[in-house]
Image (tube, helix red, strand yellow):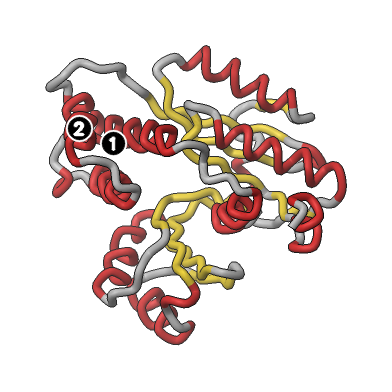
């Protein structure tokens, strides 16, 4: 699973769209709330909040819902307080997972995430047990039909990106975390549509899985992604197109 680009492709082929729209809104609301709590309610001076609002609008979240989430974060109206959490674990075939989450009850969420791993032949591990296998980078996904490779290179490398890769249907552009906003803005200025712009854990090397290990690992990733307190799931497993077609029946 190469960052989130391959995972997005897998979810489309499995017919999964991050469950219902209500679940998507829940995750977006928590990100807006936490961003406002940490950096204040003015998106002009809070890049995390600005990005969260853009993501919410891309999913057609109502403006009133966005406003309430910001007000809950700044304390203008009452609401549960969420905190960022990070979980690391192992899956079938020696695969490694990093799960970013938000919770209002750290102990409850840890116990539930542990059960998800155990149910799918994996285990929740100690901090640092999986992060070493990933690079923490700014990641921008672009529709391959929306931009030529030549223009991609001109915009991305000119704005400070480190690298880009062909990920099938998409281009994946990688940047230092501190340069993500500038590179994203460069694509927007060049009028290149952006699928996704976020900080992600990118595997340094990928483990190709087949057979039962591939099926169970895919189900583990989906179950972690579907958990209410999960925001992002990253893993170092890879599944060939042929194997994926076998699993999904497509």
Residue 27 vs residue 245: left or right?
A: left
Q: Residue at x 87, y 48 (%)?
A: 211
Quarter of the image for residue 78 reads top left
Residue 166 lies, in percent from the top left, at 58, 72
Q: Nearer the viewer, residue 160 or 231?
A: 231
Residue 64 lies, in percent from the top left, at 17, 35
Residue 88 vs residue 78: left or right?
A: right
Q: Residues within 10 Å of mark 1 (few under 14, many from 20)?
A: many
Q: Which one is earlier in the sequence, the residue at label 2 or at label 1? A: 1
Q: Residue at x 37, y 64 (%)?
A: 194
Q: Residues within 10 Å of mark 2 (few under 14, many from 20)?
A: many
Q: Is residue 40 visible?
A: no
Picture disc at residue 70: 2
| Label 1 residue SS | helix
Q: Is residue 144 above or below residue 53?
A: below
Image quarter where the C terminus lies is bottom right
Residue 202 lies, in percent from the top left, at 57, 53
Residue 237 vs residue 99: left or right?
A: right
Q: Is residue 128 above or below residue 196?
A: above
| Disc 2 to disc 1: CB gap under 8 Å | yes
Count of all numbered marks drawn on residues in the image: 2
Disc 2 and disc 1: Cα gap in Å? 6 Å
| Label 2 residue SS | helix
Q: Residue at x 65, y 49 (%)?
A: 14
Q: Nearer the viewer, residue 153 or 245?
A: 245
* Residue matched to label 1: 32
Picture disc at residue 106: none
Q: Residue at x 40, y 76 (%)?
A: 157
């Amino acid at each position: 699973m190469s960052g989130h680009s391959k995972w997005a492709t897998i979810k489309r082929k499995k017919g999964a769209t991050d469950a219902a729209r209500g679940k998507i809104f829940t995750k977006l609301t928590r990100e807006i709330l936490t961003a406002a709590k940490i950096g204040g309610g003015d998106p002009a001076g809070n890049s995390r909040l600005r990005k969260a609002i853009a993501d919410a609008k891309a999913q057609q979240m109502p403006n009133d819902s966005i406003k309430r989430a910001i007000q809950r974060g700044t304390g203008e109206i009452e609401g549960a307080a969420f905190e960022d959490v990070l979980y690391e674990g192992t899956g079938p075939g020696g695969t490694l997972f990093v799960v970013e989450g938000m919770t209002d009850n750290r102990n409850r969420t840890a116990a539930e995430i542990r059960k998800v791993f155990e149910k799918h032949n994996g285990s929740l591990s100690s901090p640092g047990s999986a992060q070493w296998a990933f690079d923490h980078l700014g990641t921008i996904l672009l529709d391959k039909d929306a931009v030529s490779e030549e223009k991609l290179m001109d915009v991305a490398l000119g704005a400070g990106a480190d690298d880009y890769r062909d990920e099938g249907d998409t281009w994946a552009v990688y940047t230092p975390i501190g340069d993500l906003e500038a590179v994203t803005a460069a694509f927007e200025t060049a009028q290149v549509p952006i699928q996704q712009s976020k900080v992600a854990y990118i595997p340094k090397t990928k483990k190709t899985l087949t057979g039962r290990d591939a099926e169970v690992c895919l189900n583990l990733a989906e179950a972690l992604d579907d958990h209410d307190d999960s925001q992002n799931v990253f893993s170092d497993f890879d599944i060939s197109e042929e194997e994926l077609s076998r699993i999904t029946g497509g």
